[in-house]
Amino acid sequence: INFLMSPLSALLPLFVNKIHGGTEVSYAIVVGMFQAAIVVGGLLMSLFRGFSKPMIFLLVTLLFQVLCQIAITFIPTTFGGRFWTMGAVLFLYALPFAVIDVSFITSIQLLVPKEKLGRVIATIMMISPAMRPLGQFLSGVIAEFVGINAVLIGSAILAAIVFGLIYFLTPLRSLDSIIQKVMAKANGTKDKEETKEQEVEEILIEETERKPLLIQARDLEPAIEVAK
């Protein structure tokens, strides 16, 4: 997915300056709104507990991002507010990034055994960023022959097709039910631990109320020793 969605970041400067005749200020507006969406998404994620079906959320979000990437190619070059419109579309495009990352990492932590978790995350962190430079390089080369708009539209549609095939033709779609079972089991264990802690606290309170005189005498022992 990083490979197929990377053309947007690689071709965005040329898209703003070459196709739409933008300036440095125009590009700053577009990129600023894009980055602001990532910050806002992170803040929203800090207040949100996540989705019960992260795989479906990833599929829907990717399709939404595909539509956003295609939509910016249809913004008229003669429209006066085209850069603000472009920035608004990319704001919506980048808003789910933080939620996607957190949902993905959470799913990995729930599904992968603890003894293998470090190696799995290290492998993901190595492969995922490595795909982005390759996609950016190829997008620039291909854009020389077919044009920037064609690359943006084609890569977005191809990303939707690839992820759709992965979702429907692999066990990926069954992960939601597995994650729900794991979370339910974890919540059940947590509830048992909390119940046990409450029982211990109640026992301590009962013992304290049952033997107040012993507690008071024990508290007075230092004073009695001093008086002696």
Image (tube, rainbow, N blue to C red):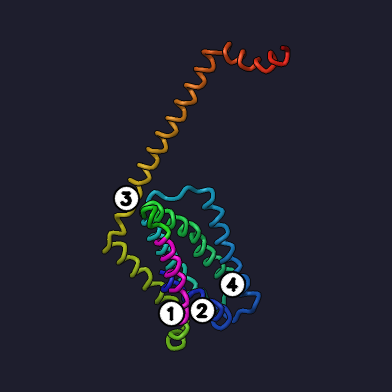
Q: Earlier in the sequence, mark 3 or mark 4?
A: 4
The kind of residue on which mark 2 rests is Leu
Residue 222: x and y, percent? Answer: 67, 18
Q: Which residues are magenta?
A: 119-139
Nearer the camera: disc 4 or disc 2 = 2
Residue under circle 1?
Answer: 151
The kind of residue on which mark 4 rests is Phe
Residue most toward the left?
169
Residue 26: x and y, percent? Answer: 62, 74
Q: Earlier in the sequence, mark 1 or mark 2?
A: 2
Is mark 3 in CB contact (under 8 Å) with mark 4? no
Cα distance in 3D space between marks 1 and 2: 9 Å
**Residue occupying the point 47% across, 56% down:** 102
Quadrant of res 153: bottom left
The kind of residue on which mark 3 rests is Ile
Q: Residues within 10 Å of mark 2 (few under 14, many from 20)?
A: some
Residue most toward the bottom?
145
Quarter of the image with the N terminus in it: bottom left
Q: Secondary structure at mark 3?
A: helix
Residue under circle 4?
Answer: 83
Is mark 1 in CB contact (under 8 Å) with mark 2? yes
Cα distance in 3D space between marks 2 and 3: 39 Å
Cα distance in 3D space between marks 3 and 4: 44 Å
Residue under circle 3?
Answer: 178
Q: Earlier in the sequence, mark 4 or mark 2?
A: 2
Quarter of the image with the C terminus in it: top right
Residue under circle 2?
Answer: 11
